[in-house]
Amino acid sequence: MLNILVELAFGAGVLCVAAARNEPVDARELSPAVDEDNEMMFNSSYGSVVDIFTPGVDMDHSVVGGGRTTSGSSGTSLATGFIGGLVLYLKSTDGAYAQAKIVVGLLKELATKDVITGQPEGTLNLLAFNGQPLGD
């Protein structure tokens, strides 16, 4: 039922970003992530429904109560925050009301291509990128 609602929302121009369990199965069930060497996370999902990969291994992040951790946390929940922020950034560059299909197109256009290793055949090789090289 949830997948049907997400598809209906997408058709209406709403882009949903979600995390799921970390298990190496087809992404029709779960979300994908990569490590700092652009290798697919050992327990990341994969498959034809994967639109894009995001960092999700050894991530620095904020913690409850303030501050940040450098403990190197990993998981699709961290990858989801990354892509969620990128989606909002891209929506802001294309107008606050950019349609979901436009944002997905921008994500794919800006993505770094063919740098991910270890993903099964049939999975797109796109790593999320905001289009701004370091130092700019």
Image (cartoon, rainbow, N blue to C red):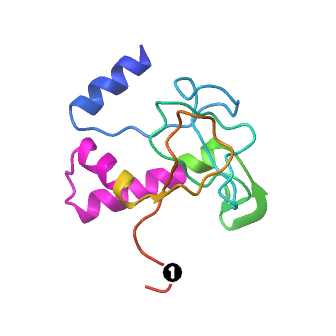
Q: Which residues are magenta?
A: 81-106
The percent position of residue 35, horizontal first and vertical second, equals: 69, 55
Quarter residue 88 falls in: bottom left
Residue shown at the point (34%, 21%) measured from the top left: 5
Question: With 1 as the anchor, is 64 left or right in this view?
Answer: right
Q: Residue furthest top?
A: 1
Q: Position of residue 126 (x, y in %)?
A: 49, 51
Q: Is residue 45 left or right of residue 97?
A: right
Image vertical order of residue 53 relative to residue 31, above or below: below
- Would you place residue 20 above or below residue 78 in this image? above
Query: If the image is split into quadrants, where does the N terminus sit?
Result: top left
**Residue drawn at point x = 48 percent, y = 30 percent:** 48
Query: Residue 85: x, y in percent?
Result: 45, 57
Please tell me which residue lies in front, 62 or 30: 30
Please state which of residues 70 and 30 is positioned toward the viewer in this rendering. Answer: 30
- Verify whether residue 60 appears in magenta: no
Vertical relation: 97 (above or below) 2: below
**Side of 56 where 83 appears, left or right:** left
Element type where label 1 sits in the image: loop
Residue furthest to the bottom: 135
Label 1 CA crowd tier, 10 Å (few <14, some 14–19, many 20+): few
Is residue 92 magenta-colored? yes
At a point 32% along the width and 59% down the height, the residue shown is: 90
Q: Position of residue 124 (x, y in %)?
A: 49, 42
The kind of residue on which mark 1 rests is Leu
Magenta residues, dominant SS class: helix
What residue is pinned by disc 1? 134
Q: Residue at x 46, y 31 (%)?
A: 49
Position of 9 with respect to 52 (left or right) is left
